Image (cartoon, rainbow, N blue to C red):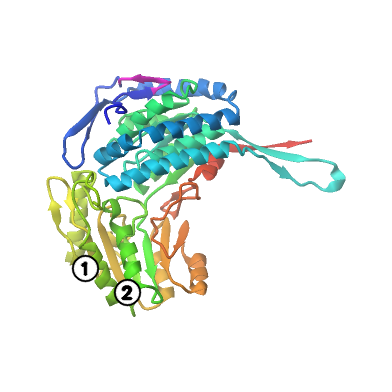
């Protein structure tokens, strides 16, 4: 890990110390030891990054799409050489189970290669005019200019790449602000970016407090904001961004519908994994499960059995599924929400206690007899808590899924094609995942939600649309 570790900011093609008096201490989430300390940047350094991004925008225009593709394929090759180191770093600073950290690094490699292939398919669109006009219309997409990305802790590499890659393919410089909980992965990744020989300012990675970061959101020279995080913060940033477009990938309280025509054991196992992987710290973790009353008791019995088998410990140990929550504040909030739900009538079927107070490990918890106004139902828990309730009918379960201000993704388990179509038509979510959990994601698919779960879509091709403007040529 030492060979890739970088504790410095990356501004305008150079590694440098932040010039603010503030520092961010990044700790190992299990051992609670400090891994590194990163000095925050000053306002002057933010303005420097913006200025260099403007000059890089002009220089990068000379890079052909073939040039861009080759650079990205080189980047993927370099990341492959350091897979183990990045996996360990993600596991340490983000507290991610090592198996899942390896998956993230591999997804990042795949994501880069997909972006490289998109760069080779820079094909415009045509417009059909009446034949008698003798005219041809050609549409081409052009980059909009410098953009800003704000990425979360839970996928410190891959979710940052969901912002960096489309920007580099289409031709936009990008300034990235990673989460203060887990910035080292992206700062270290800048070592690989640096080797590509991009114009100074095509990528800058800054650590700063919220007041300094607001400069990036408000600055007119920044042409788009792409944010992944909580709904509360996302919509606040949207109001600050004024006229610039925003892409918001926000949270949810993802639900599963389980019909009666399913293999109860297999589905219970799959939904359990989708609920508790990474201690539920994924915005599409299964949080609500609505099970047909005819199979409810059998499903719950299987689900509890699977839950109690889960390994909860140090994330670097093989097979661990539930690890420390990202910090004590989140840990205490999860505890409080469970206690509150029980006081209001919910029943704990398993869990409901702290495994390790010092390391912020909370037991995988299954609740039932919840009501629609409880926080564990209405809000995003972002922890190892799932609510399982019975439904009288398939359509009734769909209504329960929709009874939420969020609408990211939903999972539906049924072998009935008509019910599958009905779920797709009626569910108010960005994606309906059939016979799988809502946590399913392939990185180049259109990913995003409706209602309070966001605005816009990620996935290379879809993010490139947000980061570019159509221009029409008529001749």
- The answer, for residue 229, to whether it is visible in the render is no
Q: Which residues are magenta?
A: 11-17
Quarter containing the N terminus: top left
Q: Nearer the viewer, residue 416 or 428?
A: 416
Marker disc for residue 346: 1
Residue placed under numbered mark 2 in the picture? 390
Residue lying furthest right: 132
Seen in the picture, residue 342 relative to 453 is either above or below; the reply is below
> Depth check: 296 or 23 in front?
296
Q: Which numbered mark, 2 or 1, is in the foreground of this view? A: 2
**Label 2 residue SS:** strand
Residue 149 in percent (x, y) is at 42, 36
Q: Name the quadrant containing residue 371.
A: bottom left
In which image quadrant can residue 141 be found?
top right
The local crowd at label 1, few if under 14, some if 14 to 19, many if 20 or more residues have their Cα within 10 Å, is: some
Q: Is residue 413 above or below residue 284?
A: below
Residue at the far front: name it. Answer: 81
Dot 2 surroundings within 10 Å: few (below 14), some, or many (20 or more)? many
């Amino acid at each position: 890990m030492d060979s890739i570790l970088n504790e410095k900011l990356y501004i305008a093609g150079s590694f440098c110390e932040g010039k603010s008096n503030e520092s961010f201490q990044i700790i190992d989430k299990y051992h609670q030891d400090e891994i590194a300390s990163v000095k925050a940047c000053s306002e002057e350094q933010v303005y420097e990054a913006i200025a260099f991004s403007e000059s890089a925008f002009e220089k990068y225009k000379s890079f052909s799409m073939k040039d861009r593709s080759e650079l990205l394929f080189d980047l993927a090759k370099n990341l492959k050489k350091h897979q183990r180191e990045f996996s360990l770093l993600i596991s340490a600073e983000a507290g991610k189970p090592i198996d899942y950290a390896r998956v993230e690094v591999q997804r990042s490699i795949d994501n880069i290669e997909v972006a490289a292939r998109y760069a080779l398919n820079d094909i415009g669109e045509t417009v059909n005019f009446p034949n008698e006009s003798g005219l041809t219309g050609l549409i081409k997409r052009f980059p909009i200019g410098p953009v800003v990305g704000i990425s979360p802790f839970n996928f410190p590499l891959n979710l940052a790449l969901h912002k960096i890659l489309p920007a580099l393919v289409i031709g936009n410089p990008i300034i990235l602000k990673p989460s203060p909980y887990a910035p080292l992965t992206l700062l270290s990744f800048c070592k690989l970016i640096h080797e590509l020989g991009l114009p100074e300012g095509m990528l800058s990675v800054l650590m700063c407090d919220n007041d300094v970061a607001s400069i990036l959101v408000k600055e007119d020279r920044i042409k788009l904001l792409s944010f992944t995080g909580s709904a509360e913060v996302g919509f606040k940033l949207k109001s600050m961004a004024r006229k610039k477009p925003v892409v918001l990938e926000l949270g949810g309280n993802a639900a599963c519908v389980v019909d009666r025509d399913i293999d109860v054991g297999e589905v219970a196992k799959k939904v359990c994994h989708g609920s508790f992987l990474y201690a539920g710290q994924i915005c599409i973790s299964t949080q609500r499960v609505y099970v047909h009353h005819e199979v409810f008791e059998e499903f719950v019995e299987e689900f509890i059995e699977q839950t109690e088998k889960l390994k909860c410990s140090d994330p670097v140990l093989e097979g661990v599924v539930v690890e420390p929550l990202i910090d004590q504040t989140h840990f205490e909030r999860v505890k409080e929400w469970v206690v509150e739900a029980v006081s209001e009538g919910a029943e704990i079927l398993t869990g409901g206690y702290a495994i390790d107070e010092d390391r912020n490990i909370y037991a995988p918890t299954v609740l039932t007899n919840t009501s629609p106004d409880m926080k564990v139902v209405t809000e995003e828990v972002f922890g190892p808590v799932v609510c399982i309730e019975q439904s009288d009918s398939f359509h009734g379960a769909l209504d329960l899924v929709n009874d939420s201000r969020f609408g990211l993704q939903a999972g539906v388990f049924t072998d009935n094609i008509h019910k599958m179509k009905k779920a797709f038509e009626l569910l108010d979510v960005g994606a309906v995942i059939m016979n799988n959990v809502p946590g399913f994601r392939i990185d180049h698919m259109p990913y995003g939600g409706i209602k309070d779960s966001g605005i816009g879509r990620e996935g290379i091709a879809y993010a490139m649309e947000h980061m570019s403007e159509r221009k029409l040529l008529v001749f």
